[in-house]
Image (cartoon, grey):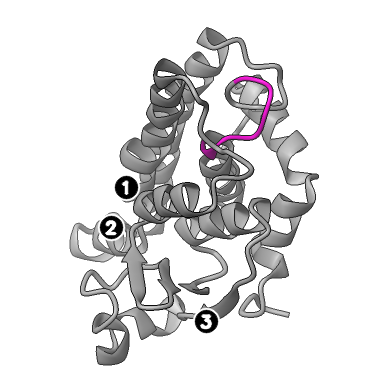
Amino acid sequence: MQLYGYYRSSASYRIRIILNLKEIEWDYEAVRLDRGEQREPGFLAQNPSGLVPVLQDGDTRIAQSAAIAEYLEETHPRPALLPGVPAARAAVREMMAVIGCDIHPLQNLRVLNRVRDDLGGGDAGVRRWIHHWIGAGFGAFEALLERHGSDGRHSFGGTITLADAWLVPQVYNARRHELDLAPYPLIRSVDAYCRELPAFAAAAPARQPDAPA
């Protein structure tokens, strides 16, 4: 398999975690978002949305991290990253959506550039925007951790799920933008545990070949 991504892209980070957890061999192809490579014709031919990640598996090409995650779960079912019971699977997908639908799209580079430049927010406006929307989403995620009785190591149940693969990259982004995480003790606890696991540690942005030296 080949993964097209960017070291600091949280969506790419999610898929690196999943590939590592499932012990799938994969090659990494960096798409330098900071250089606009996602808008070049060669990449747009692979993903017309001009976004990362993109997974290439033989003749199969998939964009959008949730679709990639479901594909990997179906084609490489061990270890399972979704629970076996429908209600539990739905709970994990709900937690994924809080991050993937409610937080992440509003942190996308193209959105932040529009807030900064086209809407005149400047750097200070972007910072307020980021803190507001990550904070709102983390408040909801923290409440779901409490509702589902998180053990402080996993977002749901007693094993790693896709919810953890979604959470850890978003916490990385929150720290990068200097959001105060004190109001979210369960999020901090789950993140701290997961980041020490080999699959998560190897997927960290600083460990990727396109990360600055």
Residue occupying the point 65% across, 21% down? 186
Residue 29 counted in the magenta span: no
Residue 159 counted in the magenta span: yes
Which mark is in front, 3 or 2? 3
**Which badge, 2 or 1, comes first in the chain's sequence?**
1
Distance (Cα) linking label 1 and label 3: 25 Å
Residue occupying the point 42% across, 38% down? 99
Answer yes or no: is residue 36 visible.
no
**Which badge, 3 or 2, comes first in the chain's sequence?**
3
User: What residue is disc 3 on?
Assistant: 29
Find residue 111 and name its label: 2
Which mark is in front, 1 or 3? 3
Distance (Cα) linking label 3 and label 2: 24 Å
- The picture places residue 4, in percent across and down from the top left corner, at 46, 75
Highlighted magenta segment, given as a residue range: 157-162
Find residue 106 and name its label: 1
